[in-house]
Amino acid sequence: MNEQKKDGLSGIVDLIWLNQANASFKEEEGFLSMDLDGTHYDRVLLSRCFPFDEPETHISVTDCDLKELGMIRDLQDLSEESREACRLELARKYFTREILSIEKIKERYGFTHWEVTLASGKKTFSVQDTYRAITKITSDHLLIYDVDGNVYEIKSVDALPHRSYRHLELYL
Amino acid sequence: MLTLSQRTEGAEKIINTLALNPEDIVLFALADLNARYDEQETVLVATKENLFISDGKQTKTYALTDLQKPTIEEKIGTCALVAEYQGKKRVLATMTNSRKQECRLFVKYLHMQMDKGEITVDEKDFRQEQFCPKCHRRYPDPNRKVCPDCMDKASIVGRFLTLAKKFKGQIALALAAMAITSVLGIVSPYLSTSFFYDQVLDIRGTFYGDLLFVVTLMLTTQIVTILLTMFSDIITAKVSAKIIYDLKCTIFDSIRRLSMRFFTGRQTGGLMTQINSDSNGIYWFFVNGFPTFFSSIIQVVAVFILMMAIDIPLAIVSLLPLPFYLYAVARVIKHQRWLHARSYARNRSMNSVLSDSLNGVRVVKAFAREKEETHRFNHYSEQASEMTKKITYYHNTRFPGLNLLIYLSTLIVWSVGGWMAMKGQITYGTLMVFISYVGILNGPMFSFVNMSDAFTRCVNGMQRLFEIADASPDVLESEHPVAMPEIRGEVEFRNVDFSYEKGRKTLEGISFKIEAGHSLGIVGHSGAGKSTLANLLIRLYDVDSGGIYIDGMNVKDMAFEDLRRCVSIVSQETYLFAGTVLENIAYANPEASKEDVIHAARIAGAHDFIMRLPNGYQTKIGFGYQDLSGGERQRVSIARAILKNPKILILDEATAAMDTATERTIQEALERLSENRTTIMIAHRLSTLRNADSLIVIEKGKMPETGTHVELLKQKGIYYRLYQLQLSALKNIGVEE
Ligand SMILES: Nc1ncnc2c1ncn2[C@@H]1O[C@H](COP(=O)(O)OP(=O)(O)OP(=O)(O)O)[C@@H](O)[C@H]1O
Ligand SMILES: [Mg+2]
């Protein structure tokens, strides 16, 4: 399942692919630990190579000094327990809240004030400079950064209720 | 107790479950996520002995004696309070970025409690200016001290008016002229209708048959109107331009005073455009928006009074459709504005794609991506043109509708008024005057609706401009600077700490001393903090703690002028102004003679290539003119710094873009120059530093090694490894030093 693809670039620089056979992960006290070929790492960090396109594939594993220890090609390559531990760690690192609907967007003095509904309920936040704070991953999938640096996500603009879309339309 | 977050109801409840004596609590803050990253208020409470973390359901207690190194770790969008407890590192609490600041302070004071056993509040953390004085909430953007909820429009306008005070005579004149013209604008239809029919054409009229009189009167009103309009237009244009000019001068003056942090903290690129477009917004409001509004108000009020005076029932009938019309206009304008905003956004996207691919044309061509680029552009262009189409369509359908409304309201007057005229209740002239007044009433509705928008834009612009004018530089010149006309050039860093952004130390505990006239080399990896040292020495930024001394005098106590006269820097990013080579070199010292410029250029090794330029020292360089190579630019910069004849010279990678032979020549010249000059050299190429009296190594903001070249080699540390690497690189290609 994990054989090296032989194209022109692979193998030029060493890269360890992590899988069930050589690595296992565990979550302890809020941290992720890893055992790799008999070495124990108290704490490792995960980073998605393509955070928007590939949430569960191509995940880089580093130590606390951000030195890469290896790469997970697909979470499916790991054992059940390791996979869940990694999912939890990724969810923590890439914490975003999904916006289900937009009640109101009010513009005032260079800020926009948003009233939205999240899975956890109503929420208000402020955004400065909507042009830069709204990142389009695709024309349908948005990330919105508020003034504090919190990240909100709209998974599909088209799937928003029509009224929400009307509020948002101006900023797209 | 030190309360760092708002004590919400939920928080109170949780604190109560802890069953603590309220007097024992020394520190309180609120986090907003639980361990599973669900939103839930989580209380952080510290007593003198323990740290409690509780979400109401689950409480964890940590003895402070077993707790070590609590810190806030940042992730994307969230933070975590992490600490070692009983020797094992763990996550104690998690929060979104909204709570970051409060929790960071919590950690800071928790440290203080753990280290010193008590808490002394640092005023700086609670400085008023970070909070809105009205609603006591933190400003959303610390660089912009504006609370969007409490912004006071009246005071901003008031402040702007103080700028206008100088011109109050002229403004009063202009307003008076406007008032007169608006009234004349009502008189002239009156003359040409009611007065003409009832007083001149009618046999019973006072001026029956006096055609010449009425024509002269009409002509006079018209001429007076034209003259007065010209007069007021000229004055408003002049005065507004003057005020804006004054405002801009104030702004540019403040910008000059501001420190580096102001510019790096925001998009400087947009700053100038912003200032310009803001001042234009204000200018247009006062030249165009406000006068129209002012005359409209006078006209509407005057017409209203006149109509009422002439005939009340007909006046009411004529005014009846007005609210509907106002409503319709407001709707249409609102939607139109919305369309324009969208069109603007789409055009902006289109333009950015266009400029993107034009700027990157080299790459586009190199990778043969022209087709895809065209495709990308077409997509945005199509969207933009779609919007233009919509706007035109909207305009062409709605405005005839509005005109129809006006026409209908006139028809009402025609029919009701006609009926009244037939019955002899009003004269034919009165009917005519009403009809023309109804027309006059409709016009200003547009200006009323537009006004609110223009006003908001204008106030926003003023607010942003005042903000710049008010921004206080965080690097301030000492109020009573110590004069230092002559310095020897001894430089000392004592235990310097510095960070660009809170929470991430860029420099930590840097101490070194350079004797007057000696030279120091600084090495270290990219991003280690070398240039930052130079920035601190010339006070582009101020140290957080510790101090920097020149001849034993803290740089903070020196006059800017003395400091910048005696220290000269050739920075890593060379910047040349648009102008001649001569102007660029003489920039630092405009009084220097042409011969001095030549000497400086010779020392910097720039003379030869300058002479090869078509117009020698008078060749224009910089944006849009002759382009210099990277190494050539550096040499011009070095010449500029040398010309100032500084006691302390900083060369930050000043010769990095040159070939080794050129570098050597310049270095030899510099060495002769630096005989009784203190020189600080920053370089990656160790050979550049081989003659430095002493060296320091900067690594991740700290200074792990210091000494001479030989001493450092003996230490076998970072310097040794760097040296080995560079040496072996040379050996590899068959060069031996
Ligand atoms: N204006 C700034 N605001 C925030 N961080 C900055 C700023 N300027 C530099 N930094 C950061 O401070 C650190 C030190 O930067 P510095 O320019 O001093 O490095 P350097 O040692 O000169 O590196 P190089 O050799 O690449 O020039 C870097 O991590 C950099 O990202
Ligand atoms: Mg640098």
Image (cartoon, coloured by chain):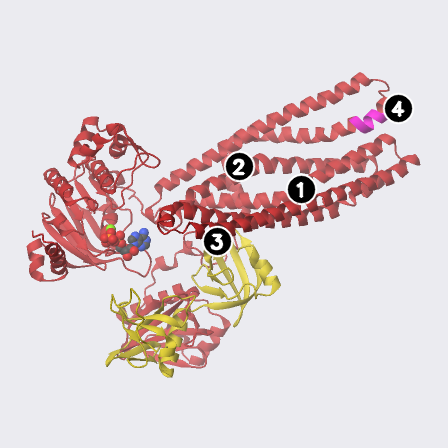
Chain colours: A yellow, B red
Q: Distance between the residues labelled 1 and 4?
A: 37 Å
User: Residue flagged by tag 4: what amino acid is it?
Assistant: Asp
- Residue sitting nearer the eye, B626 or B29: B626
Are the residues flagged by discs 1 and 4 from a single subunit? yes
**Alpha-carbon neighbours of circle 1 within 10 Å: few (<14), some, or many (≥20)?**
some
- Residue sitting nearer the eye, B78 or B72: B78
Q: Mark 1 points at which residue?
A: B446
User: Residue flagged by tag 3: what amino acid is it?
Assistant: Tyr
Quarter containing ligand 1?
bottom left
Answer yes or no: is residue A128 visible. Answer: yes
- In the image, residue B542 above or below residue B123: above
Q: Mark 4 points at which residue?
A: B202
Looking at the rendering, the stretch of residues picked out in magenta corresponds to B192-198
Where residue B90 appears, as percent x and y from the top left, is 32, 76
Comparing marks 1 and 3, which lies closer to the viewer?
3
Q: Earlier in the sequence, mark 4 or mark 2?
A: 4
The picture quadrant where one finds residue B98 is bottom left
**Alpha-carbon neighbours of circle 3 within 10 Å: few (<14), some, or many (≥20)?**
few
- In the image, residue B676 above or below residue B33: above
Comparing marks 4 and 3, which lies closer to the viewer?
3
Q: Name the residue under label 3.
A: A131
Q: Mark 2 points at which residue?
A: B283
The picture quadrant where one finds residue B580 is top left
Query: What residue lies at 31% left-to-right and 67% top-to-bottom?
Result: A7
Name the image quarter holding the N terminus of chain B: bottom left
Host chain of mark 3: A
Q: Do the residues labelled 1 and 4 touch (CB within 8 Å)?
A: no
Q: How far apart are marks 4 and 2 (CA)?
A: 49 Å
Whether residue B197 appears in magenta in the rendering, the answer is yes
Q: Earlier in the sequence, mark 1 or mark 4?
A: 4
Where residue B143 appears, as percent x and y from the top left, is 41, 52
Host chain of mark 2: B
